[in-house]
Image (cartoon, rainbow, N blue to C red):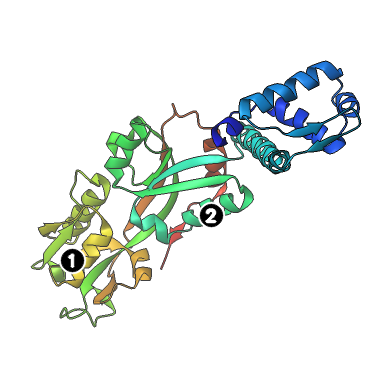
Amino acid sequence: MNFDLQSMDPRSLRMFLALAEELHYGRAAERLFMSQPPLTKAIQQMEERLGVTLFDRNQRRVRLTIAGTVMVEEARRLLTQTELSIRAVQRAEQGNAGRIRVGFVAAVLFMDIREVILGLERKMPGLETVWEEMGSSEQIHALEQDRIDIGFAQISQGMSRMMSIPVGRVELVVALEAGHPLARRRRIRLADLAEDAFIAIPRQSGPSFHDLTIATCMGAGFSPRIVHYARHLVSVVSLVAMGRGVSLVPRSFARAGVPGVVFKQMDGATVLAEYSAVWNPANTLPLLPRVLALLETRQPGINRA
C-alpha cells in the first residue's frame, strides 16, 4: 500500500480530497472544474489500485469508509511533501538551496571564513554544507573529479588551472612541546632551533606550506632537519605534544588548546601563510556564485589567535 500511495499522482490525490471534503460528486466535480463522470472513474480506479473501498455510496449520500478516513491524512501528507519537494528544487535552481561540498585545511576552521559559510547557512535555510578535511594538493584533485565544489587551501603552481580568490593570511609561529628548554621564552629566535628535529607537512600534501617552512628556516640561516611528516597540521601538533620535535604552524592553532604544546612568536619579520578559496571554473552548481560573492566582499586580512 505504501508503494502505491507514494507513486500516486498529485492530480488523483486532489480529486480524492475534493470528494472526501465535499462528500458529493457534483460539488466535488464543480470544485475541480471537471464533469462528474471522469471524477467517478478516477475514484473507482484509485480504489481498484489500492484494493480498498474509500467511499460508501448510495443514492442519497456519500461517506468515507475507515480506509477512506486514513487515506485523507495520507493524501494531505503526500501533497504537502510533493509541494515542499517542488519548492526545494526551484530554490536549488535559483541558487537558494541545495548542497555544497567544501574541502578545507585545518587552519581555515580557526579563521573567519567559517563565519561566512555559517552566515550563508543562516540566510539560506535550504542550504546544506558538507565539509571534508584534505591537503591543498588533494583539494585540487577533488575539484577536478567533482568530489568537492570549493576548497580552502594554499595556492601553489599546480593550482593554476583553477580559479581562486584570497581569503586570509595567518601568522606562522613555532609549536614547542611544553617541556622544551625554550618553551618559557616570550619569543623564539628561529636560529636557536637549528639543531632540533622538525615535524612538517610532506610536500606532496601541501607544497606551499612545506616550501614556506623550508624558506622560513633558510631565512634564519639553517636548513631544517625534518625527521617526521604528517599530512594534517592537527597531526603535526599532536606529534609536537609527544615530544617528537618542533614545527612551524599557523598561529590560529593556538585556539585549539592542544595539551602539552606552547605556541611562540618568532623574532624578526612576521611570516604569513596565505589562504585562498579555490574552485573549478567548469563547476555549474547554482549555489557556488552566491558563496563566491560573499567571499569576494570580504577584505582579506591577517587572522590572529
Give me the residue at 52% from left, 37% from top. 288
Q: Is residue 166 left or right of residue 71?
A: left
Instruction: Say which of 38 and 148 sits in front.
Output: 38
Query: Which quarter of the rendering shows the C terminus?
Result: bottom left
Label number found at residue 118: 2
Question: Quarter-wise, where is residue 14 in the image?
Answer: top right
At horizontal 17% and vertical 81% (from top left) the residue drawn is 179
Circle on res. 152? none
Taking depth in this image into account, of 214 and 6 the one nearest to the observer is 6
Which residue is disc 1 drawn over?
A: 239
Describe residue 127's horizontal placement relative to residue 145 as left or right: right
In the displayed structure, 152 sits above or below 192; it is: above
Of 286 and 255, the residue lying toward us: 286
Nearest the camera: 273 or 257?
Answer: 257
Q: Position of residue 276 (x, y in %)?
A: 41, 45
Q: Amino acid at mark 1?
A: Leu
Q: How many numbered circles does the render carry?
A: 2
Task: Using the rendered view, name the quadrant where residue 236 is placed.
Answer: bottom left
Q: Residue 130 vs residue 145: left or right? A: right
Q: Is residue 136 above or below residue 39?
A: below
Distance Cα–Cα, label 1 vs label 2: 31 Å
Q: Are there few (<14), some (14-19), or many (20+) residues within 10 Å of tag 1?
A: many
